Amino acid sequence: MLSHEQVLDEFRAAGALLEGHFVLSSGLHSARYLQCARVLMDAKRAERLCSSLANAVRAGGKDVELVASPAMGGVVVGYEMGRQLNVPAIFFERVDGKFALRRGFNIEKGAKVLMVEDIVTTGLSSRECIAAIEEAGGVCVAAACLINRSGGKADVGVPLYALTALEIPAYPADALPLELAAIPAIKPGSRNLKT
């Protein structure tokens, strides 16, 4: 498995470890942002990262029949994890604010599913995706992500495999530190949020 520094080196080499003032998908604000799309745009880098993550899932003894991810951030990492684990990969999309399967995707009743995200911060979208997997008839046996930015504190309700964990402080909009409040916020993620 890749070491903590090797994972961060991949992000640095891709220009994907950013500093400034960012609004995260969760709505929280942070001085650091991990732009997984930049890391995953290089197929060889995505293969290295996901191969290591797939090895961690295998080492955990999880029998997986399907990978399911939340769109948008989990799509590329989910498909590469499916390739690494030699199982199909599908994704959920938000429809009226709730995760749903579209595009003819379905989950067979009782299928053992691995939920895959790029980054876990609060675990909210992971829990929502896991609930959608179970509503669709699957059994979510575990979750996986490239980086757990909660420092390992996020509880998604199933075992969570991550290449590494970082504790990057995140703040509600009404409780920003002065140095962060002094910088204009940008929203680099895929969700259209209001600040």
Image: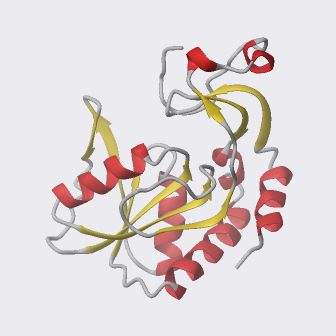
Q: Nearer the viewer, residue 3 or 50?
A: 3
Horizontal side, residue 95 vs residue 6: left or right:
left
Seen at 48% across and 79% down, the residue is 85
Question: Which quadrant would the N terminus be assigned to in this image?
Answer: bottom right
Q: Residue 41: x, y in percent? A: 68, 51
Seen at 23% across and 74% down, the residue is 111
Question: Which quadrant would the C terminus be assigned to in this image?
Answer: top right
Number of marks:
0
Q: Residue 186: x, y in percent? A: 67, 20
Q: Residue 46: x, y in percent? A: 66, 63
Q: Nearer the viewer, residue 18 or 155?
A: 155
Seen at 54% across and 59% down, the residue is 77
Q: Residue 102: x, y in percent? A: 25, 47
Q: From what the image shows, is residue 160 above or below residue 153?
A: below
Seen at 84% across and 59% down, the residue is 9
Horizontal side, residue 7 vs residue 173: left or right:
right
- Quarter assignment of residue 173: top right
Q: Nearer the viewer, residue 165 or 70?
A: 165
